[in-house]
Image: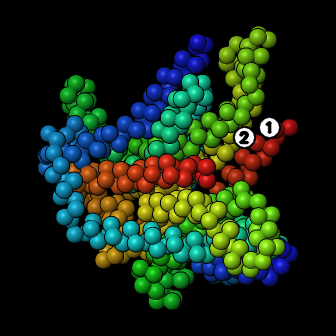
Amino acid sequence: MFDHRRIGIALAAPAALFVALGFIVPVAILLSGAFGTPGGWGLQRFAEFFGEPLYREVFWRTVKLGGLVTLASALLGYAAALAIVDAPAGWKGRLTGLVMLPLMISPVARTYAWIVLLGRTGMINQLVTGLGLSDEPLRLLFTETAVFIGLVQLFLPLMVLSLVSALENLPPDVVSAARVLGANWPLAFVKVILPLTREGLVIGGTLVFTGSVTAYITPAVLGGSKVLMLETLLYQRVSVANDFVAASVIAVILIAMSVVTHALLRHAAGRGRK
Amino acid sequence: MNPLRRVGVGVLGAVLLFLLGPFVVIALAGLSAGETLAFPPQGLSLRWVVAVFGMENFRASFWLSLWLGVGSTALALLLGVPAAYGLARYRVPGREAVRTVLIAPLIVPGIIVGLALLRHVMIPLDLGVTWALVLAHTVLVVPYAVRVVTASLDNLRPDVEEAAVLLGATRLQTFFRVVLPNIRGGIMAAFILGFVTSFNQVPVSLFLTGPGITTLPIDMLTSMEFVYDPSIAALSTLMALLSIAIVAVAERALGLSRYM
């Protein structure tokens, strides 16, 4: 009964047309703006973009923060995920729920909490001045550290959750077998757990890295105009200078970064399985 | 207990404190009795929680966000449910390509979608802010609708539908009386996921909202720059509780995590 192609096409067409006209066409037009040059088409706009010291700095800061956030999430994520998987049966679900909880909450609310903690009159500064460690409040907000902390808090749950599901699929007793055969704990981790959970690490890593480099709220609130990342730079170029060419170039860079990360990490995961 | 595990338990505790502690901080800051944002709070009271409900701008943006979430998710389901069904059951040419198109809005950063819609749809077609927001949020929710409903269709055996048709039901009757009741849970889960996504959405709406018409999260984001009293902390807490309540009820009733 499901051989009628026409019915299938008729059912899928409205949604496909809607997404094509309401999303793919406008985004494609926007991205094409990055390749237009006075003489036709070319990559001149990218050369100009990377020729600008400020833009170059923002680009490298975005890559650097994305990498550091992914690294920190992987380290904390493995430790947390191992502990969750080892927890008694009744606790496993509850602990996973607690890790998942922040994902349901508005990123604006999640980021605002750090203003309360890190601001000039925030808790950390009250402690620092109260204990006499410093006479003046420290500048904690609008620093790369603040953006880093905010991003880790935002994306760490994704890493923990994908590592938990990878660890749960680990064949039982492989770790004990490695131990019996003489591997110490670090060696068992590197030789057994890491290769067998590589796919989960790759999925989590992709989510965290692409999430961090394309984040807007965290750098906007915790970094401000002092610590620009690519998305906040895009917003600033458009709202302050009506510079749509730079916006298109940044858009292409952001999408290219996501696609390249997906491809690279998928490649890494594929190699790990063989 | 091996040493690595003991370290793991310690790190897990620290991680949970790091992930959840800030919400305790913000909730307490929002319950402050004082005039300025501070932690620890200067005495506890509900004055800012009450005050938030009386603030005209937040009230307007809350209602816009609420209706935007409901409206665009409903639209996305109207488009997404038939599409998911058609693609799951019928031999559509280029099925994988069509699926990719429908999921694509998830891959492109929201701020780019917003800017593209502003420049190449909203301005050329002279679209109002509300309609532009509905369009943008519907585009954003379609992938969730397609994905969740597809997962729920995969759990329904097609022979049941074939049996219904053999027994004399039309295709339309089969869909409404056999398929729909069986994927109701998936549709509800997609609705909740879509609503929460739309309600908390910032980057997509960033370029589309204006000073007069804005959504709640963007209103909060712009207010942060000049509001130093605990009202935003109170509002953040209320929003967090609302999201948690919706998701918790959905998890109890539908087992939402099965679809994610």
Residue under label 2:
A199
Find residue B43 and report its image quarter: top left
Chain letter behind tag 1? A
- The image shows residue B142, relative to residue A21, as above or below, that is above
Is residue A144 something one can see in this rendering? no
- The image shows residue A77, relative to residue B233, as above or below, that is above
- Colour setting: rainbow
Find residue B146 and report its image quarter: bottom right
Q: Is residue B259 left or right of residue A148?
A: right
Q: Is residue A193 left or right of residue B217?
A: right
- Asked if disc 1 and disc 2 are in contact, CB closer than 8 Å, the reply is yes
* Residue lying at the far front of the rendered structure: B167
Decide: few, some or many residues near mark 1? Use Cα within 10 Å; few <14, some 14-19, many ≥20: some
Q: Residue B139: x and y, percent?
A: 57, 72
Decide: few, some or many residues near mark 2? Use Cα within 10 Å; few <14, some 14-19, many ≥20: many
- The image shows residue A201, relative to residue A240, as above or below, that is above
Q: Which element type, helix, strand or loop, lies under badge 1?
A: helix
Chain letter behind tag 2? A
Residue at the image point whose x is 45% and y is 45% from the top:
A102
Residue at the image point whose x is 29% and y is 44% from the top:
B27
Residue under label 1:
A272
Q: Residue B162: x and y, percent?
A: 80, 69
Q: Residue A182: x and y, percent?
A: 76, 10
Q: Earlier in the sequence, mark 1 or mark 2?
A: 2
